[in-house]
Image (tube, grey):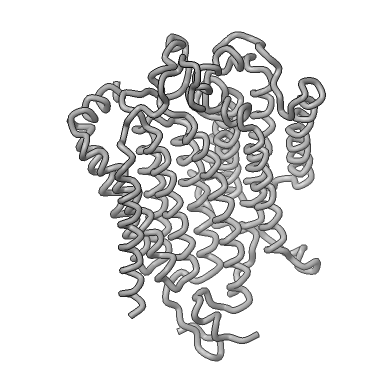
């Protein structure tokens, strides 16, 4: 019975994290949302009797994808709607 | 106007997806009986892994032995991605001297912890890809774990540098040994990437013929490539 | 022990678990597609592609599940369990797909860094209006 409740809660967290990740304006929080989607997905793969796929998704999706997104955000803008002027000044 | 149009399009795609998935009942047995005369593909793989390949992990036997050519394609895609990133973010020759890596001042806790944790993480990664044919794991998972250990050291210490020459040599030798094992299978057994039949007993470390050797080569190659990608990305100068 | 509990719950509440696995994967696909079509920032579009990939992988592994099945590994003591294992072919396919998805994401992000250095902006409607 507890497993059923855990299952439903994990599915709801997955969809909520995905919606939060594309709706938020600050890009750093959106990247954290992608990391949470990968983490819960790896638990889903374990429940569906696939341990190899769970290990691969946990290793690649949580550690490496988050760090390359953060390096990209550092070299571009952090805010989503950044408007530049004609003389290359940021408003 | 554009938003309404896109929402109608997404609803249409969602309806067709639900209509397709509705006819696939969840959890039904689609493999069929294993000992019949005409087994399905999955039934053939499940019933012949123990006798012919002597490997305990069925997924390792599928990825390396039965579908080895797809693994060769995947290793090629990773190699092309590394080359592509290195050539997109190139630096001119006069900027080559004063390039420095991103490093923020780290406290005593991070420095001590990173120095203690790095050999343990590397040992775990090497264990995962050496025992890829007995437990869940394999070349790609173990290589990623080793690259995460290198990332921890690269962020914490300013003076930790990876040697480009040694990494290039390790990657080239690992990639070449994959192809040479395949060509040796072509010469001796008349199939590319053919396996030595029936060596060792099940669930011991030296079983499975050439399968652990291929996975060790893939593990080293993936670890070195991912460390190279992270090293290139951490050395970009921001535009401000 | 978690496998037996999951199997008995699966027998009793068949509808909820079907809706859970298939519905979550289709919802993830639609959310990712909305982000690709509607957003203007380039990094948001790549985040949407990554979420779309996650939905596809969940659908594949969910199709390969068999009621009452166990993981496809011949551990010591389970050497004759070949006729109650789950389908191993979709799992081998998803393993390759995850690695290739990561490679495509990393090349796309390096292109975005290069584009930002040239045009000094990361939104696609601003890039269309600046001429070389």
Is C16 left, or right, of B198 in this rendering?
left
Which residue is drawn at the image coordinates 46% and 11% (left, top)?
C79
In the rendered image, residue C48, in percent from the top left (x then y), is placed at 43, 60
Residue at 60% x, 42% y is B150
Is residue B127 shown above or below A76? above
Q: Quadrant of residue A50?
A: top left
Count of number-bearing discs: 0
- Residue B231: tell me if it is visible: yes
Above or below, comparing residue A3 to residue B105 in the picture: above
At a point 60% along the width and 48% down the height, the residue shown is B154
Q: Residue at x 53, y 69 (%)?
A: A76
Instruction: Name the one closer to the observer, A50 or B236.
Output: A50
Query: In the drawing, does residue C103 fall left or right of residue A13?
Result: right
- Looking at the rendered image, the quarter that the C terminus of chain C falls into is bottom right
Q: Give how far across and how far down residue C41 sits, in percent.
A: 46, 71
Residue B107 locus on image (x, y percent): 50, 49
Q: Which residue is at the far front?
A: B37
Location of residue B180 by image quarter: top right
> Is residue B160 among the parts visible in the rendering?
no
The residue lying toward the viewer, choosing from A31 and B132, is: B132
Image location (x, y in percent) of residue B72: 67, 38
Residue positioned most to the bottom:
A86
* Quadrant in which the N terminus of chain C is drawn: top left
Report the front residue among C1 and A26.
Answer: C1
């Amino acid at each position: 019975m507890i497993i059923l409740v855990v299952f439903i809660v994990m599915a709801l967290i997955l969809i909520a994290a995905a919606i939060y990740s594309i709706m938020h304006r600050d890009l750093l929080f959106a990247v954290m949302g992608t990391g949470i989607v990968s983490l819960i997905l790896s638990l889903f793969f374990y429940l569906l009797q696939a341990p190899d796929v769970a290990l691969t998704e946990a290793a690649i999706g949580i550690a490496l994808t988050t760090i390359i997104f953060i390096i990209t955000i550092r070299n571009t803008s952090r805010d989503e709607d950044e408007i530049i002027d004609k003389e290359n000044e940021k408003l | 106007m554009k938003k309404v149009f896109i929402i109608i399009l997404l609803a249409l795609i969602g309806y067709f997806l639900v209509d397709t998935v509705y006819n696939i009942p969840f959890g039904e047995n689609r493999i069929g009986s294993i000992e019949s005369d005409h087994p399905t593909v999955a039934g053939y793989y499940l019933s012949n892994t123990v006798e012919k390949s002597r490997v305990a992990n069925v997924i390792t036997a599928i990825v390396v032995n039965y579908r080895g050519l797809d693994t060769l394609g995947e290793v090629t895609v990773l190699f092309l991605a590394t080359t592509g990133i290195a050539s997109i973010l190139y630096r001119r020759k006069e900027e080559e001297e004063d390039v420095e890596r991103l490093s923020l001042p780290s406290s005593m806790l991070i420095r001590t912890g990173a120095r203690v944790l790095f050999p343990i993480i590397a040992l775990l990664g090497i264990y995962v890809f050496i025992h890829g044919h007995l437990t869940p794991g394999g070349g790609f998972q173990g290589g990623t774990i080793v690259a995460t250990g290198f990332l921890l050291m690269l962020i914490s210490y300013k003076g930790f540098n990876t040697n480009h020459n040694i990494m290039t040599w390790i990657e080239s030798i690992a990639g070449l040994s994959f192809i040479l094992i395949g060509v040796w299978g072509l010469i001796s057994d008349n199939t590319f990437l053919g396996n030595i039949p029936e060596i060792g007993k099940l669930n011991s470390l030296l079983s499975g013929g050439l399968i652990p050797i291929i996975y060790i080569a893939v593990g080293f190659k993936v670890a070195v490539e991912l460390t190279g990608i992270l090293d290139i990305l951490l050395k970009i100068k921001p535009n401000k | 022990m978690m496998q037996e509990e999951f199997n008995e719950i699966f027998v009793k509440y068949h509808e909820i678990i079907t809706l859970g696995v298939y519905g979550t994967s289709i919802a993830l696909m639609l959310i990712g597609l909305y982000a690709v079509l509607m957003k203007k920032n380039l990094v948001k579009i790549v985040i949407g592609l990554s979420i779309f990939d996650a939905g596809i992988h969940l659908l594949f592994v969910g199709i390969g599940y068999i009621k009452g099945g166990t993981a496809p590994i011949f551990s010591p003591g389970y050497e004759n369990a070949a006729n109650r294992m789950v389908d191993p072919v979709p799992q081998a396919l998803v393993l390759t797909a995850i690695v290739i998805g990561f490679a495509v994401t990393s090349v796309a992000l390096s292109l975005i860094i290069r584009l930002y250095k040239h045009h000094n902006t990361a939104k696609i409607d601003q890039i269309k209006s600046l001429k070389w």
